[in-house]
Image (spheres, coloured by chain):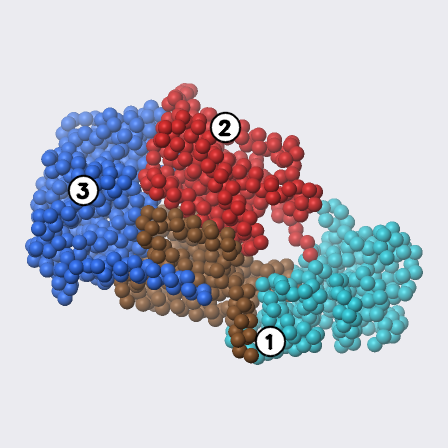
Amino acid sequence: MKFVLPGAATATALALVLGCNGAQAADDLVLGFLTARSGPYVSLSNTNEAAVRMAVDEVNKAGGVNGKQIRIVTFDTAGDPKQAATGVRQFANDNGALAVIGPFSSSEVRTAFPVGERSGIAVMSNSSSAPGLTKGFSYAFRNTVDEGKAIDAVMASLRDKKLPMATGAVAYATDDTVSKSVGAKVAPELFKTYGVELKGSVDFQFAAFDLSPQVSRLKGMAPDVIGIGAPPEGAINLSREMKRQGLKARVIGGTTIADPELPKRMEGAGEGLTIGTTFFHDVNDRTRAFTKEFGERTRAAGLNRHEPNQMDASAYDIVLIYAEAMKRANVSGDKAGLEKERTAIRDQVTALKKFPALEGEISFVNGDSVKPIYVLEVKGDAWSLFDTRKPE
Amino acid sequence: MSSQATSTGGAAPEAAPVALAVTGISKSFAGVHAIRNLSFVARKGEATALIGPNGAGKTTVFNLVSGVYGVDAGAVTVNGVDVTHMPSRRRIGCGIARSFQNVRLMDHLSVLENLLVGQHIRAASLTDLLTPYRLFPNHRWRQEARQALADNGLERYANETVSGLPYGVRKRVDLVRATLAGASILLLDEPAAGLNPSETNDLRDHLNLLVAQGLTLVIVEHDMHFIDSICSNVVVLNFGEKIAEGPLSVVRQDPEVRRAYIGDGEN
Amino acid sequence: MLTQQIINGLMLGAIYMLVAVAFTLAIGVLNFLNFSLPGLFMVGGMATYGFIRIGWPWFFAIGGALFLAALVSLLVERLAYRRGEGAEADVPLVSSLGFLVLLENLMLVQYGSDQQAFPALLPDMNLRVGGLVIGIAQIISLAISVILVAWLSWFLKRTNAGRRIRTVAENRETAQLLGVNIRRLVPQLFVASALLAAVGGVLFAVNYQQVSPWMGEGPGFKGVAAMIIGGMGSIWGSVIGGLLIGFAEVLSITFIGADVVNITVYGLLLLILIVRPQGLLGKPPAREKL
Amino acid sequence: MSGYLTGVLVVLAFNVIAAYAVYLPMAAGQLNLGIAGFMAIGAYGAAFLTNEYGWSMLAAVPVASAAAGLVGLVIGFPVLRTHGIYLALATFALGQVIAAVFLNLEVVGGAAGYTLSAYAGPYVVFAAAIGVVLVMLYLSRTRFALYLTAVKSDPTVADLMGISVRGVQVAAFALGAMVAGFGGAFYALHYNFVEAQHFNVLLSVFTVLYVLFGGAQTVWGPLAGAMFFTLAPEALRFGEQWRYAIFALFIILFMAIRPQGLITTSLFQGFRRRSNEASP
């Protein structure tokens, strides 16, 4: 009797999963999509799906790839690395997916990449930006740029525009991979490259809410620029506390704080905060059209956020990149040749150069994408484009 | 063996050797003297009663002897071994076991398992600990425990969980468990309390049998008839001090004993 | 600069103090480690935010949030505490944790996983004394915490209801013999400790101008640590524990780095538990009777 | 086996191992709220030994779990001086400290986490979990298990029966730590990545939930609890963003209706009695 309940649960779970797959048309081109509908990243992640679906609809409307339609299978990881691994396994073994979009966080990426590698299926994250995650894998990709490149672009722009940057300090969260690498390595090294005198650094916990002791110390250093490695919340808290304690300095950061709503969320505290990121809504007609459509789709889906961020744009572009790779590899979606076609897709992505995507021209080097970086500055309660830097 | 026969033997020159000796022990809790300079002995193969009005400190004496509390002064000797500073856990190894006033059985365990716990001191090696005895229905430990239950007419309760059993049964299981340690001295805290007359009779016979087998009993009890039928020596406590000692027929006449009981409003 | 850090520690400690007192009420009297309290802390902040967002004036919003927290706490009493009384001691802990997960996920569904900006209720004014910066919001929060705790301590010592509560804390059976209506007292205590936690959440939101579904976990777990360090069941112990943890946190950030905050805070807790389990002001556990 | 089922069963295997790590001390009446810390020791231990010294899994796993057990043993003595709720909170603090230490150990990657090259496939993980269950079943037939219950039920009397209460408690605690380390080691080897942030309070507390939910009275409880906690969220996938809210609500209602947990001794007795009646 005691096993009836769990047994029923398994049956239901399996029925659900298999049920989703049962309806598939044999000659669709299947892409797996790891997303988080619950858990700690849900607000950032749940809009990605709108972007992905938008890209799929556009590709399919234009006739699909090699005459076939692209179909998305989603898997909710709830932000849990274990479930991300399960998801890749399901896509590879059960769904006959040709490639995987996602997962979202660096922790999930680290468990998903080895599974993708063993299963021989390309996995491309739209968000994770911790350094060196694709190292040692041949099926692992990220359509993100290294934080070092993003912040390098910011520093170069400041130098070109002759803004004060004689002295600098660093503030970062110590218990988050990306934040820590920015604070402990990337920013200090870039300061050295650009001749900024490093006055010191302060750190805090990822979930810290009280940054008053850190700001007190920063105040003692009186830097021109403060490099920040933190989630958007950390940047908001830091800027607020700086305003409260009366510390004026330009905060600079990378994609970790590139939240479209950041200026609004700071409520006037972060004036002049400058970041490097890979998407800006007001670059050209294509980005403006994307932003408009994205807004409509997210409103229709009842989501909280209607302005696309760089992760939404990246997710959108991943679909286009895979579509291009499938076209070039002449993929048929035939189940018998699945393994070969998956590897062919990987090879095409690896070889991709200057692909004209939404975010700009994208190339891949060692699994990570190389693309333009938009330097944005907080003005009032909105971002404004400060500079665009294309990769050499 | 009748009570008359043993009671005359108390002061005789061929007195049995001392099994338990309590010498001048004192104990106070938060400044209140619970036991003051108490001495008595329990002889091998005899039953000694510890009586006194409520709050006289009888259970405290048991707690001091079994080591639940340490004494403030004095000494406790068990079968010739000074156990005064020995941790409570090791005293059972010197041959002393006890039962409890408000039956203390392990509620989630079955009757049989409670008895198996009682055997611990004789099955304490690492091999014993890791032997999967439950895979063998007729393992010697279980056989022994079942036999002990059968001896007490309790065999049908063997696999019942203790918490659901009637008080009288639990009381007797508690006693059987104490005997299974193979101890030579048993401290029995109100063994007859809460038993009906027929159960009390059975208990009396059983205890007399144990005494006849050479066990030493120390019994805290209120039922004077019960004591009279088992114990050769009686120690009377009041306010933590010994006020009389001797055969029941003698101490019963003691004026101080009468005062203590009447003053306390007991029979 | 050290003075500034001490002031920062004091403010942080005040929040932990409220949570610790909420825990201490539940544990000291009811012997219940109520893991729903971090959730109620969060409800205090998040619900206030939610009510303000739909246009309520701030005092109604706070009142509404506190009312909601009290209501949820009564549910916790009904479903977790009362039902688990006969069973193993750890069972209410499970369901109270279930409440924490439920509350967090409900807020997650409603408001998303992002941290939300909490509007500045008080004029964004700061006192500047010499080089020191002291926020008005911080001073008011500190005052409210201290007044609440002082009042509670007075209430328990000097009023009849307080004496009844202390009797229950010492011995339930005795209390029942003395005619204390435990069935009625327990829900009242649940409401009281929920209100303390929720007020903590509101003050947190006002002070740091941010709320999120997870906001209860950090202060919640540190509040538990504060309670133990001060001594379970002792209100003033919780006050000392809260301040101590606040200082330990701020000072270790200043002198060693944020990496070690958890090592310092929980190491301190572990040390106290080994050296003096009853905490700084707690009474040693009573001896068992045979 | 489908990829999805494999993935879910792997998670189940880890949850089962963790549940027994909590169950052992709990059977002796100790609530260990710091089990994640011991998992972290096993995980980082196995990762470090295979990565830096090129040890085989066969050598690294036992050593890593023994290390976790050893830490449990060393810490167990002072910590187990405290009782009840104090003990629970001491273990809670301990778990936090262990995780924080790993977060700061740069040799194993610090906050960035630590990648492994050795790999334990799904079937190895299943075998490990089945092994743990079998060992637990074996233990449940021994005097050791009997003493766990005795010590939990009445430590004073157990002591007077000559049982070393402290010894049994420390043994249960250390064995539990060892099992946790064992599970942690395979976690690292299977997912090829460990990070200190994963081994947080909530992991510890949820593992305790498995056991209390399944019922701590019998050796089957943790298994049932872990199965429920692994499979129910899967079954609730249709709930989309409501998934975990529904799950939490269910836990609350279940515990209100059946506070003693899913599987109890009396349930077994009921079975026994019924089967006795059935076979005259």
Query: Would you name the residue on which mark 3 appears?
Result: A313
Q: Chain C is drawn in which colour?
A: red
**Quarter location, residue A331:** bottom left
Looking at the rendered image, the disc whose residue lies closer to the viewer, 3 or 2, is 3
Query: Does residue B4 lie above or below A40 as drawn?
Result: below
Q: Chain A is drawn in which colour?
A: blue
Per the image, label 2 sits on a secondary structure element best described as helix
**Residue kind at label 2, given as amino acid type:** Ile
Q: Position of residue B182 (x, y in %)?
A: 68, 73
Per the image, label 1 sits on a secondary structure element best described as helix
Which quadrant of the figure contains the N terminus of chain A? bottom left
Q: Do labels 3 and 1 share a chain?
A: no
Question: Which chain identifier belongs to the brown chain?
Answer: D
Question: Which residue is located at x 40 percent, y 24 percent?
Answer: C122
- Chain containing mark 2: C
| A199 sits left or right of C160 in the view | left
Q: Where is residue A375 in the image (x, y as percent from the top left)?
A: 17, 34
Which quadrant of the figure contains the C terminus of chain A? top left
Query: Would you name the residue on which mark 1 appears?
Result: B142
Residue closer to the observer: B103 or C55: C55
Query: Would you name the residue on which mark 2 appears?
Result: C144
Q: Chain B is drawn in which colour?
A: cyan
**Quarter location, residue D59:** bottom left
How far apart are the alpha carbons under marks 3 and 1?
A: 72 Å
Residue closer to the observer: D233 or D95: D233
| D63 sits left or right of A392 in the view | right
Query: Does residue C86 lie above or below A186 as drawn?
Result: below
**Residue kind at label 1, given as amino acid type:** Arg
**Residue kind at label 3, given as amino acid type:** Ala
* Image marks 3 and 2: residues in contact by CB distance under 8 Å: no
- Chain containing mark 1: B
Q: Do labels 3 and 2 share a chain?
A: no
